[in-house]
Image (cartoon, rainbow, N blue to C red):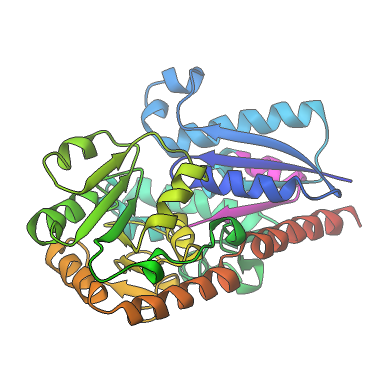
Amino acid sequence: MLRLGFVMEQTLGHVTHHQNLARWVAKRADIDPHWMPIAADSADLWQKMPVVRGNWSLKASLRARDAVSRTLAACPLDALFFHTQTTALFSIGTMRRVPSIVSLDATPLNYDAVANAYGDRADNGGWLSRRKYEWNRASFRVAAHLVTWCRWAKESLVADYDISPSRVTVIPPGVDVAAWSQTGASEQRTESDNLRLLFVGGDFERKGGNLLVQAFRAALQDGCELDVVTRDSSAVTACSGLRGVRVHTGMTPNCDALKGLYRKADLFIFPTLGDCLPIAVMEAMAAGLPVVTTGVGALGEEVEHGVNGLVVPPNDPDAIVDAVRELRNSPDTRLAMSGAGKHMAETCFNARTNYTALLDLMVSVADAARR
């Protein structure tokens, strides 16, 4: 049995990725997993240290270094898995001794393209930016292999960081298709029923929640209902006074209540301003929901305009209204998009297939180092 260490960033959709991966690791009799979750908030030394406490890259990587050191002191590991690359920066020396895979949803330069939406500034190309670039490239080069969630990130590794394509494998995260799959509610509805819209986004503003509320308030209250799932309490205020809107702030990833909302919905509305490859969209496709979203980040690798959803410009509430109306007026289109989405979830974002491939890659890296 191989002893494999999993260093897992615990922010945003990476929490769901960790949960989904852990389920499939538990099915493997050939793997003895050692989990090292790197929390966003922790009352440790690094949370108290000036400069470090305000810089997630430094804080996450220092916490990861400490966690890896503790684990290795307790038992040797055959291989390490770092997700994301942020957790690997202070472990370059360890990665030279223990074969390691670095997994990422986006490169730092990918992230710069959407940084404004996250409330951050893109690197300016100065001395500090150059040092950050070289540090990340060093971690990429010392890794035994690299895994990206999407082609967008792989292309950046190759073009921007001079990494050989043979050292990078695209393996998206996955969802349990059987658990999320359902008969679309739209197939059971009559013309007189309201169209049920679903929005899921922990970061309400960045995911386009305010834009959706603006569109709903302006033109969608008649004939539509809206469920908003978020951890952001500001959504309650934003939705105040709107007829047919329900805000859910206490749901956790993969919970039955969340799956129930997908089951009742007709459309998934996700007008995000900044993203990489969101898992919520995979869940929507597995549930048979046509998706209305934007083309930021790698979303074009999930939603093909006119096939399994509609792609609208970011920051355009009028376009959201037009897309919802178009799909409301065409049940046949919704049904076709539902089938296309399910097919894409099954073939591209299936947890069984993708996590099996990821774990097989880890095993091969560990085995190669032992020979």
Q: Please say if 293 is above or below 330.
A: above
Q: Does the magenta-highlighted stretch encompass residue 102? A: yes
> Measured from the top left, where is residue 63 in percent x and y?
56, 30
Left or right placement of residue 334 versus residue 180 in this view = left
Q: Residue at x 22, y 47 (%)?
A: 245
The quadrant in which the C terminus is found is: bottom right
Q: Residue at x 78, y 49 (%)?
A: 27
Q: How many marks?
A: 0
Q: Residue at x 71, y 63 (%)?
A: 357
Left or right placement of residue 351 versus residue 128 in this view = right
- Camera-nearest residue between 129 and 175: 175
Left or right placement of residue 201 versus residue 163 in this view = left
- Camera-nearest residue between 57 and 230: 230
Q: Residue furthest left?
A: 218
> Measured from the top left, where is residue 131 in percent x and y?
43, 48
Visible in this render: residue 81? no
> Measured from the top left, where is residue 261 in percent x and y?
40, 50
> Measured from the top left, where is residue 300 in percent x and y?
39, 72
Visible in this render: residue 150? yes
Q: Residue at x 45, y 46 (%)?
A: 258
Left or right placement of residue 3 versus residue 236 in this view = right
Rendering quarter of residue 224: bottom left
Q: Which residues are magenta?
A: 91-108
